[in-house]
Amino acid sequence: MARGSSCRCLGAADEERSCRDRTSRTDANRAIRLYTVRNAAVENESMSDVLVRDATRADVPFLADCNVAMAFESEGKHLDRDVLTRGIVAVFDHPERGFYVVAERAGQPVGSLLITHEWSDWRNGGWWWIQSVYVTPDARRGGVFTAMYREVETRARAGTGVIGLRLYVEKENSRAKATYSALGMEPAYYSLYQRSWVDLDRKDA
């Protein structure tokens, strides 16, 4: 038996088997902890490779691609690209509506999100809403959203009159909920209600 084991085998077959089982479980637990630490290190290293910048009008096609993909992947909706593109351009035309950020890795765009504003009279300040979040499939689980979130949070905390960050998430999206919780966000007390006059789902798609 290897030195350093926490159990002592006295020669009886049952005790030897019990000792081997406990040793195997200990080794497995150590492997799991090591795997978790290595994964965290990889994600931190990946995040350091991500550049988050303000989007420009040159990014409009990429932003449209992200929104089309996100709507279909998350809700099965087919967006009208012309309407969507005008909606994106409208943010650049009216900066008071919000702003986009783009994440890049090795000079290539790999993610984006939109920030819009909501005024709170109770708090005499504004919420920043995180919307239209998308990370390209080959860049997922690599710290891209975390990098965008951290950049937005840093800007919000440095801004005047910004009281916090909000977002909404599909009820069934447990992975996204876990990501948001890990970043320090908490479920809100409120449920979201709406009444829309615009049907986003194209019937001819």
Image: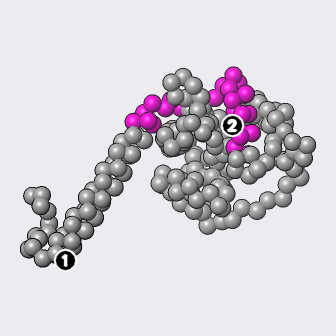
Callout in the foreground (2, 1): 1
As drawn, is 23 to the left or to the right of 186?
Answer: left
Res. 155 visible in picture: no
Image quarter in which the N terminus is found: bottom left
Q: Nearer the viewer, residue 53 or 3?
A: 3
Q: SS class of the residue under badge 1?
A: helix
Magenta highlight: main SS: helix
Amino acid type of the residue tagged 2 in the rendering: Cys
Residue 175 versus residue 85 in the image, above or below: below
Q: Which residue is mark 1?
A: 14
CA–CA distance between discs 2 and 1? 60 Å
Q: Which residue is mark 2?
A: 66
Question: Which residue ends up furthest to the right in the rendered image?
Answer: 204
Q: State the extent of the magenta-drawn residues as a range.
A: 45-71
Q: Determine whether 115 is above or below 59 in the image.
A: below
Q: Is residue 7 left or right of residue 69?
A: left
Query: Do residues under tags 2 and 1 come within 8 Å of each other at their CB atoms?
Result: no
* Residue drawn at 73 percent across, 33 percent down: 64
- Across and down, in percent, residue 161 comes to 57, 46
Badge 2 element: helix
Please count the marks in the image. Answer: 2
Q: Position of residue 168 (x, y in %)?
A: 65, 55
Colour logic: one colour
Q: Mark 1 is on which residue type? A: Asp
Residue 39 falls within the magenta-colored stretch? no
| Location of residue 84 by image quarter | top right
Q: Earlier in the sequence, mark 2 or mark 1?
A: 1
- Which residue is found at the position 11% from the left and 71% from the top? 9
Camera-nearest residue between 24 and 39: 24
Q: Is residue 169 left or right of residue 48?
A: right
